[in-house]
Image (tube, rainbow, N blue to C red):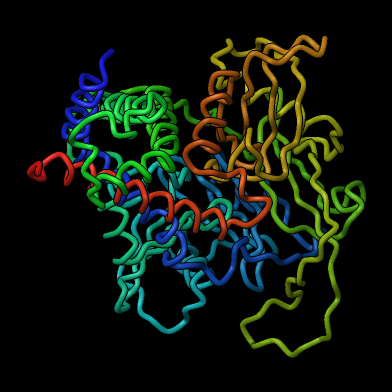
Amino acid sequence: MAHTTLYRWHRRMGLVVFVAIIAWALSGLSHPIMSRINPRPVAMVPPVSAADIAELAPLSAALLANGITEFEQAQLLNIEDGSFYRVEHGDSTTYINARSGQRVALNDKTYAQQLARYYLGDETHKVVSVERVTAFDEEYLYINRFLPVYKVSFERPDNMRAYVEVSTGRLATLIDDRKAFVGWVFRQLHSWVFIENPWVRTTAMSVMLLAGMGLSFVGLWIVWRGRSKNSDKELRVKRSSSVWHRRLGIGFGVFMLTFCFSGLYHLLNKPIVAQPELSAPRTLFNAQSLTLNWSDVAQKGGSAYFHRGSLVEVGGLPYLRLALAAPKLAEKTQKSAVAEHHPNKPMQQGGRLIYIDAQTSQLCASCERQHALNLAAHYEGLAEGEPLDSPVEKVTRFSSDYGFINKRMPVHAVHVGDDGTGDIAQRTVFVETATGALANRSSFSSKLEGWSFSYLHKWHFFDPLSKTLRDILLISTTLAITILCVLGVWVSFKPRS
């Protein structure tokens, strides 16, 4: 192809894609800045304390005494100086003092406020509203993962909103006015959410990304063919804008190509219209069938103290999933009059997780693995009772296969399709046994796309060296690409001499 034809197409594509590239570049430039100016919690993990197992009131008796015969979920929580059964039954949630067996005034909204203040470190500002959120919206995005959560809004100059998950005590996210505004701008410029129709939006973005790839490729091809070396009268005139456009193109054209390619790959790898995900398996427990003996649990579990527990169904039977704690005895301090006689103790690392049959109080050594397999079978759409026997791996840290974006931790990776011969599993299902939630799915194609987006688009290969260095290089490269595009348009419209 003649040099003049290549140059003509390079100019045309540049003029078509100019606004889109500038929008993506500037919004991409803001991303590492946003991550540093966003509000940060004073604590990263839920409040942790331990309490004596043997002093708990029998679960069945506590439920029946409060008129609860059937229920969907039950957790055993330590909140401040008390231990409580949190029971979800029908449309109601009831808190019962786990030592006295009596219903208390505590509820999800009150507990959500306590969690929000804990994560913010804010005990002074007024809470103006507490709302239960059951679906993602324009402020609480899918990237936050957890549902349902409670939105706790504070009367502060920044209008801080804390989103917390009361069933686990986790913080989902903190959002103030600045984060909400910058996030809105980012989604408009980077994700083009102003185009409401997802098919039109995906098509428009794909066309622009393809044009950006073509623009970069043709520009690099021109350079390789020696187009910049005095082969045209226009380029023999050594104008500074032309010279710098070529220099930046040589230095950063490859990065523009990889950004566009990885962005297009990421865009097309996702379903255009997201399908609703399967909810966690529904359970229904009968209070009369629960005959837990707390003294036996403490003896067989090997610890007299617990941190948190929940009832789960494994193989059709109810089990107590209990996180044990090794208490760290602190100096005795005088408690206020409203404190329990047996206060909760600070948690020390070294506790373990056990499963106890809620009908026989027998320890189950393999229930965690079986629970993960049952959850994976549910999310794979297998018929109820259809067995699934696959390798199960406990995941306790984020990696390229299961990234931080998935939020939930720890999880279990169930390698579906692995026949034990060493071949790569067809896909991996990540499940959270604490909540029964689906954390993520991955396959060979999704891993390949994840690698492309992580390393070609976000440069996570710099993370082992320095995340700050990565952000500095990304910002510098993005600025260079922005200047490259501006100079290209300037050269195209500037009158020839």
**At which x and y percent is residue 301?**
88, 48
User: How many marks do you count on the picture?
Assistant: 0
Residue 96, x across and y down, in percent: 58, 59
| Residue 118, visible in the rendered structure | yes
Judged left or right of residue 70, residue 308 is: right
In the rendered image, which quarter is residue 422 located in? top right
Left or right: residue 218 versus residue 39 is left
Residues 75 and 461: in front is 461
At x 32% / y 49%, what residue is drawn? 244
Looking at this view, is 398 or 27 the one in front?
27
Q: Is residue 375 above or below residue 187?
A: above
Q: Residue at x 60, y 18 (%)?
A: 444
The quarter of the picture where the C terminus appears is: top left
Taking depth in this image into account, of 169 and 3 the one nearest to the observer is: 3
The quarter of the picture where the N terminus appears is top left
x and y percentages locating residue 419 in the rendered image: 77, 9
Task: Give the percent coordinates (x, y) of residue 149.
Answer: 43, 51
- Residue 105 seen by the camera: no
